[in-house]
Amino acid sequence: MNELIIGSHVSFKKGTQLVGSVNEALSYGANTFMFYTGAPQNTKREKIDLDLTKEAQKIMKENNIDINNVIIHAPYIINLANTSNMDFSCQFLSEELKRAEELGINKIVLHPGSHVGCGEQEGLKNIIFGLNKVLAKDTKTKICLETMAGKGSELGINFEQLKFIIDNVTFSDKIMVCLDTCHINDAGYDIRDFDKVLDQFDKIIGLNKLACIHINDSKNDINAHKDRHENIGLGTLGFDNIINIIYNPLLKDVPKILETPYVSLDDESKERLYPPYKFEIEMIRNKKNNLNLMKEIRSFYK
């Protein structure tokens, strides 16, 4: 039986880069992880340190982390859906793809973009134009379009939109999909009947295109279009439904990545926040909801 491929978002810091990312993932009991190569809200990027990259790859091999399951997340400032910032978005995405290649990472998750008033069809055409501008025959890293919640003028909010993009990109073999459990709930998919959702995905896009899954509970009811993540077992999706997704046999080889909220030490203080991933991964591996999750996280970090 294949081992569960489970991890979380981790940091990528100037001094330690990928080494720090790997070690953080290991501290959570993870065997994969996802990271930004710099702050998601700006363009500041440090040069990739090849020595640190080699060291990180060595640590991964020693700890049975398959680098093919490790994922980069593109920054939010990239928006291919509107022409007002197209040149910048394409240039920056191209640079992120080069950085991914330097790090040896072959998957990068991208929010498809927001049309910001130009309309759904025009926005989808813009995304296709941008991806065609960025991708080439020799591009090694695959772009994984993330399913979105439908907040504002977001695109990629249903399988049909993603299919349209994939079908119209010249090098469509370079395009994959990242499924987000909170986002698809907020977009209107009923994950309580996940087999049906997965069947829809397979018929419209194809399971061979599913590169990774963001595992998040949601603060919102279905079809809310709000995109507010919640810690596992504390939201509207339900612990058992999330476990059913994670352990679906059709998804056994697909990396699962937690993006759940950091936790404050008490309900009043929001100054310092701490990662919940060590505890959530333990819950998931045990397939048992921890009703004292917040208490145990806060006790651990105090």
Image: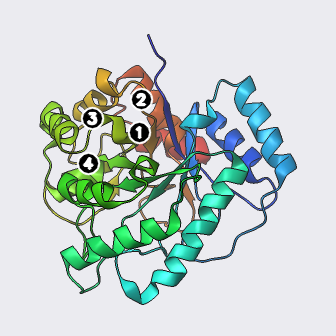
Which amino acid type is marked by label 2?
Met
What percent of the width, then of the height, locates residue 216? 35, 47
Give the side of residue 14 with respect to residue 219, left or right. Answer: right
Give the side of residue 57 with respect to residue 168, left or right. Answer: right
Give the side of residue 151 with respect to residue 54, left or right. Answer: left
Q: Nearer the viewer, residue 92 or 180?
A: 92
Q: Are marks 3 and 4 in contact (CB under 8 Å)?
A: no
Q: Is residue 94 above or below residue 279?
A: below
Numbered marks: total: 4
Q: Nearer the viewer, residue 202 or 221?
A: 202
What percent of the width, then of the height, locates residue 244? 26, 28
Cα separation, mark 3 vs mark 4, equals 8 Å
Residue 175 seen in render: yes
Q: Secondary structure at mark 4?
A: loop
Q: Residue drawn at (76%, 32%), measured in percent from left and top?
A: 59
**On the image, numbered disc 3 is attached to which residue?**
239
Q: Secondary structure at mark 2?
A: helix
Q: Are marks 3 and 2 in contact (CB under 8 Å)?
A: yes
The quarter of the rendered structure image containing the N terminus is: top left
**On the image, numbered disc 1 is attached to which residue?**
293
Cα separation, mark 4 vs mark 1, equals 13 Å
